[in-house]
Image: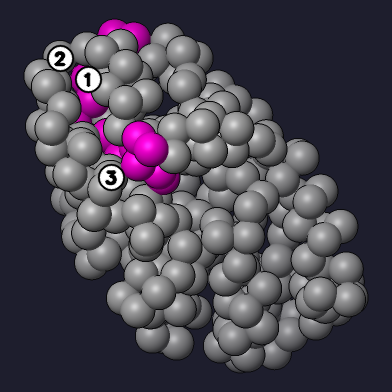
Amino acid sequence: MIRVLGCSGSIAARCHTTAFLLDDDILIDAGSGVGEMRLDELARIDHILISHSHLDHVLSIPLLADSVIRLRQGPGGLSELRPIHVHALPETLEALRTHIFNGVIWPDFTRLPSAAYPILVFHPFAVGEQLTFPAKGGLGADRRVHVLPAAHTVPGVGFGLETPQGWWVFSGDTGPNPALWKALEGRRIAQLVIETAFGNEEAHLASISGHLSPQSLAHELTQLDGEVSVYITHPKPGEVPAVLAQIRALESRHRIEPLREGQRFNAPVEG
């Protein structure tokens, strides 16, 4: 099960930035949508997969770490603390260390509450890697997530989750990205969640900031095989009416609709 916690490019009333919850223990990005979860739900997060270092995708990591330390300790106290594992590109992890967990913006929770028992543990990955997470409670199949290429202003990735219906794919923040379509060749895609941050009148801004507009999205989707359910994420709140109107005007063989907060995708993994 994938639950959409946030899918906006910025904040406003009922607009939360990017975050998805896989089952009840894996976050895919950690934007402001994480703040909609109850404390007991937050305490069940074991892994966070980060697409890139921009604030709208990482801002909940330090607050989450601070909220759940006591709840994730076992009967033996600190020595049984269950850390949260953060998975990202090496450049993204270095950005978190340098610019957030630096003792100035936020305490270094990779060394707190103690260096021996931190609440956050960082794990680098690479584009093309497959991440495997055991099924919850040892029941069912492992969950397999593929790290996909993105083309943004900072090093970034997307993710592909294997499901019986095909792959659930999240593009991450990206501009035109031939490498993504190459990586997806021959794959059965069940759903594609892809960003479109700006309307066509802001196409120049989209281009220089590593995002898509409806006109560049249309070109990207011509490279996607078959007929796929496509969900648009990451429009800026002030851009939503223009983006949606321009997307509805596109001619495409794919079924395109906006992603909604609270939307759920049934995505048990393949055996």
How far separated are the C-alphas under marks 1 and 3? 27 Å
Please give the residue where the numbered disc 3 appears in the rendered image: 243
Marks 1,2: beta carbons within 8 A: yes
Amino acid bearing label 2: Gly
Q: Is residue 123 above or below residue 262?
A: above
Q: How is the image coloured?
A: one colour
Looking at the figure, which quarter contains the C terminus?
A: top left
Q: Is residue 252 above or below residue 174?
A: above
Please give the residue where the numbered disc 1 appears in the rendered image: 188
Amino acid bearing label 1: Arg
- First-in-chain label (2 vs 3): 2
Q: Nearer the viewer, residue 18 or 122?
A: 18
Amino acid bearing label 3: Val
Q: Is residue 181 left or right of residue 245?
A: right
How far separated are the C-alphas under marks 1 and 2? 9 Å
Q: Is residue 203 left or right of residue 67?
A: left
Is 132 part of what is drawn in magenta? no
Q: How packed is label 2: few (under 14 Cα within 10 Å), some, or many (20 or more)?
A: few
Please give the residue where the numbered disc 2 appears in the rendered image: 226
Highlighted range, magenta: 185-201
